[in-house]
C-alpha cells in the first residue's frame, strides 16, 4: 500500500466504485462504466493491485425491455455462500425507467461463473409503493443478525425529489418490510441542480452504523452527507438516525478534486479503513455531467476522531502506519 496515491485518480473513468474484500483477503472491484451498458469485475490479492487487474465483463444489458439502458452503480456482495450483484437499469425503450435489479452467481469465482438474473428487487407483500418510481443505488448491510437494503427513490410531481429509504430483507432479492424514509434533501447543499440524496454506503464501528450518501447534481456541487445510528436501536425507526447538518466531504478546488461522492468502504491489508469514491479532476465539465466519462475512482484513508466518528479528509493520507 506504500505506492498508493491517496485522493488521486486510481482507476480512470469508473464512477460509483465498489470494493468488496473477500474472506480470503482478496479484493473485488466493480463500478459504472461510461457506456452504461455492462457490469465489469476486477480481482486482485491487494487493494492497490485492482488498478492493474484485468477487467472482465460478467453481464451485458438487454437489447429490448428492462435492463436495457443506463446500467448504473453495481455492487458485489457475498451472502449465504453465493455472490450477488445489485445494480440499477432502465428500459431499452425508456432509459429513464430506472429500477433496481439483482444477479446471482452460485459458483466460487464471480468473474468466471454464470450470473442468473433474479429480476427486479421485490417489495414486501404488503408494500405496494416500493420501487414504483425512479429507484437506484441499492446497498446491503447486516446488523443484529438481520439484513437491510438501502436505496434512493424519486417521489413527487413536477420537480421530483430523490430520497433514501430502508427496508429489512427477506431474501437477497426481496424485502421483508415496507420501505421507511431515512432522509430527504433538507439542506441547501443537497439541492444544487437537483434535490438529491443517493449513493448510500455503510461503515460500522464500536456499535454504531455510519451511513454516508451523496447529494445534489453530479457536477462540482456533488458532495457527501452522513447519518448515524446506534446498532442497538430499531434501524427501521427514522427518528433513531441522526443527520449531519453539513456535508462531511465536498469539492476542494485547491487540490483539484471536484464532486466527490458515491463511495463504498473497505479495509486495506493492515486493517485500516479505506473509502473508495469517485471524483473529477476538472472543475469545468464538457457536456452533460452525467455522460462526461471523467469521474475517476479514488482512495481515501479514513481516520476516527475521539468520539469514534469517521474523519473524511483529503489531508489524512500520512497519518497511518
Image: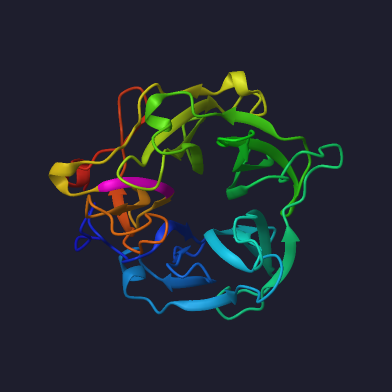
Q: Position of residue 302 (x, y in %)?
A: 31, 42
Q: Where does the magenta region start and end?
A: 258-264
Please state if 197 lies on the left or on the right of 146 as rendered. left
Q: Position of residue 107 (x, y in %)?
A: 66, 75
Residue 108 visible in image: yes
Query: Magenta span has 261?
Result: yes
Query: Magenta span has 19?
Result: no
Question: Between residues 242 and 295, which one lies in front from this camera angle?
Answer: 295
Please state if 68 lies on the left or on the right of 124 as rendered. left
The N terminus: image quadrant: bottom left
Task: Report the residue that reaches farthest toward the front.
Answer: 158
Residue at x 22% of width, y 55% of height: 281
Examine the rendered structure and indicate whether residue 57 appears above or below residue 300: below
Would you identify the image quadrant in which residue 83 lies?
Answer: bottom right
Residue at x 74% of width, y 62% of height: 119
Examine the rendered structure and indicate whether residue 134 appears above or below residue 309: below
Residue at x 66% of width, y 78% of height: 114
Residue at x 55% of width, y 23% of height: 241
Q: Position of residue 200 (x, y in %)?
A: 51, 42
Most common SS among magenta residues? strand
Q: Position of residue 276 (x, y in %)?
A: 37, 52
Picture colour scheme? rainbow
Amino acid at each position: 500500500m506504500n505506492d498508493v496515491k491517496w485522493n488521486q485518480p486510481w482507476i480512470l473513468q469508473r464512477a460509483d466504485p465498489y470494493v468488496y474484500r473477500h474472506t480470503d483477503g482478496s479484493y473485488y472491484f466493480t463500478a459504472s462504466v461510461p457506456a452504461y451498458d455492462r457490469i465489469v469485475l476486477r480481482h486482485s490479492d491487494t487493494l492497490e493491485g485492482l488498478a492493474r487487474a484485468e477487467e472482465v465483463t460478467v453481464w451485458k444489458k438487454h437489447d429490448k425491455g428492462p435492463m436495457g439502458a443506463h446500467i448504473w452503480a453495481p455492487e458485489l456482495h457475498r451472502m449465504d455462500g453465493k455472490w450477488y450483484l445489485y445494480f440499477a437499469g432502465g428500459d431499452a425503450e425508456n432509459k429513464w425507467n430506472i429500477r433496481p435489479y439483482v444477479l446471482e452467481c452460485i459458483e466460487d469465482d464471480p468473474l468466471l461463473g454464470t450470473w442468473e438474473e433474479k429480476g427486479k428487487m421485490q417489495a414486501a407483500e404488503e408494500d405496494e409503493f416500493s420501487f414504483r418510481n425512479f429507484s437506484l443505488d441499492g446497498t446491503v448491510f447486516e446488523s443484529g443478525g438481520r439484513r437491510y437494503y438501502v436505496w434512493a427513490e424519486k417521489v413527487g410531481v413536477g420537480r421530483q425529489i430523490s430520497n433514501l429509504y430502508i427496508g429489512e430483507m427477506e431474501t437477497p432479492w426481496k424485502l421483508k418490510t415496507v420501505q421507511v424514509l431515512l432522509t430527504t434533501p433538507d439542506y441547501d447543499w443537497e439541492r444544487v441542480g437537483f434535490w438529491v440524496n443517493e449513493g448510500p454506503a455503510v461503515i460500522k464501528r464500536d456499535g454504531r452504523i455510519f451511513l454516508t450518501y451523496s447529494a445534489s447534481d453530479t457536477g462540482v456541487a456533488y458532495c457527501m452527507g452522513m447519518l448515524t445510528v446506534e446498532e442497538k436501536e430499531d434501524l427501521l425507526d427514522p427518528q433513531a438516525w441522526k443527520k449531519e447538518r453539513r456535508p462531511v466531504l465536498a469539492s476542494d478546488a485547491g487540490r483539484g478534486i471536484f464532486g466527490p461522492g458515491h463511495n463504498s468502504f473497505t479495509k486495506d491489508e493492515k486493517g485500516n479503513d479505506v473509502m473508495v469514491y469517485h471524483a473529477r479532476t476538472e472543475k469545468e465539465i464538457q457536456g452533460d455531467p452525467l455522460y462526461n466519462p471523467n469521474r475517476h475512482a479514488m482512495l481515501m484513508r479514513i481516520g476516527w476522531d475521539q468520539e469514534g466518528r469517521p474523519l473524511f479528509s483529503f489531508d489524512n493520507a500520512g497519518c497511518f502506519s
